[in-house]
Image (cartoon, rainbow, N blue to C red):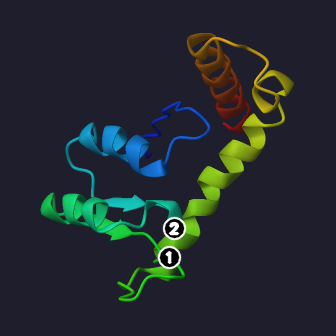
Amino acid sequence: MSDVFLLLTAGQVSDFKGADILLADLPEGTEEVIGDRGYDSNPIRRSLSDQNITVCIPPKKNRKSKPPYDWHLYKKRHLIENMFANLKDWRPVATRYDRCAHTFMSAIHIAASFTFCLKE
């Protein structure tokens, strides 16, 4: 089973800042990281490659040198998209009902736990 990590950032914060925090705390033995085009940057790719982690991030459309990625592995990313779709079924999560970040994150954890238990 894969580990899922959630990080809450402000709406206007770039994906790169959140990635720095998440990638610093990757569990030992991580073999691959799948990300969307928002995480396509040389520092992120270099950081993962230095740790011998397979990088599966499609290149941005405007990138001049397009690094290869495993398209079949990238198809697994739909599982994460499905998780976010299920979380958005919860009205307090979808509308960001809670003002405090810690309360909102608690609602996300409760919704994710409940959704996960229903899938089992």
Q: Position of residue 56 (x, y in %)?
A: 40, 70
Q: Earlier in the sequence, mark 2 or mark 1?
A: 2
Identify the residue at image location x=53%, y=30%.
Answer: 8
Of the 4 image quadrants, the one containing the C terminus is top right
Amino acid bearing label 1: Lys
Q: Position of residue 1 (x, y in %)?
A: 44, 45
Q: Position of residue 21 (x, y in %)?
A: 33, 37
Q: How many marks?
A: 2
Residues under numbered marks 2 and 1 in contact, where contact means CB atoms less than 8 Å apart:
yes
Disc 2 target residue = 37
Amino acid bearing label 2: Arg
Q: Does 3 sit above or below residue 79?
A: above
Q: Residue furthest left?
A: 50
Label 1: state its secondary structure. loop
Q: Compute the Cα span from label 2 to label 1.
A: 5 Å
Disc 1 target residue = 60
Residue 64 left/right relative to 109: left
Give the quadrant of residue 114. top right
Q: Residue furthest bottom?
A: 65
Front residue of this view, candidates 47 and 90: 47
